[in-house]
Amino acid sequence: SLLKKPTLLFQGKLWSRLLRDSKTSPKGKMIAGHSGMAQMTSGAVLADYRGNSVFPALVDATKSFSKARGSRAIRTGIYKANMSSRRVFIKCGWIETPELETSDTVSFVTYLDPDFQKELGV
């Protein structure tokens, strides 16, 4: 987006998102920063392909790839207003994790190692 519209750099909303204080609890910071935790930053499906189970397949592929790399869990943050993405993660069995929530995002975690959730105390 910035390449197409460099003027976005001057909008406060962009900077507030980039520089936001996560307001994450100490436990949330421990969970997010754990060496076994991978992060899924973004995912998107072209409008023509939505509703064809493409996004759940991408989420599952991310899980397989992360597990093969040695990750024990994956976290993701989704804007609170993005109900369609939230539904996909819930449907795929990801767990909403309030400890990682920010003022504008809801966080979900999927555990690739069942013992990891116990170790984190979540």
Image: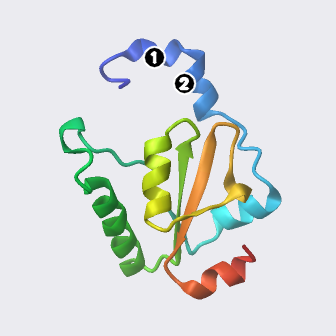
Q: How is the image coloured?
A: rainbow
- Residue at the spot 62% in from the left edge and 82% down from the top edge: 116
* Residue 27 visible in the picture: yes
* Callout 1 crowding tier (Cα within 10 Å): few <14, some 14–19, many ≥20: some
Q: Tell me if residue 105 comes above or below residue 66 in the rendering.
A: above
Give percent across and percent down for residue 105.
61, 43
Residue labelled with disc 2? 14
Give the camera-side residue of 54 and 70.
Answer: 54
Asked if residue 31 lies left or right of residue 36, the reply is right
Q: Amino acid at mark 2?
A: Leu
Give percent across and percent down for residue 33.
65, 64
Q: Tell me if residue 8 comes above or below residue 65 in the rendering.
A: above
Give percent across and percent down for residue 81.
55, 35
Res. 118 image quadrant? bottom right
Q: Amino acid at mark 1?
A: Leu
Per the rendering, the mark at residue 8 is 1
* Callout 2 crowding tier (Cα within 10 Å): few <14, some 14–19, many ≥20: few
- Residue at the spot 81% in from the left edge and 59% down from the top edge: 26
Per the rendering, the mark at residue 117 is none
Dot 1 and dot 2 residues touching (CB under 8 Å): yes
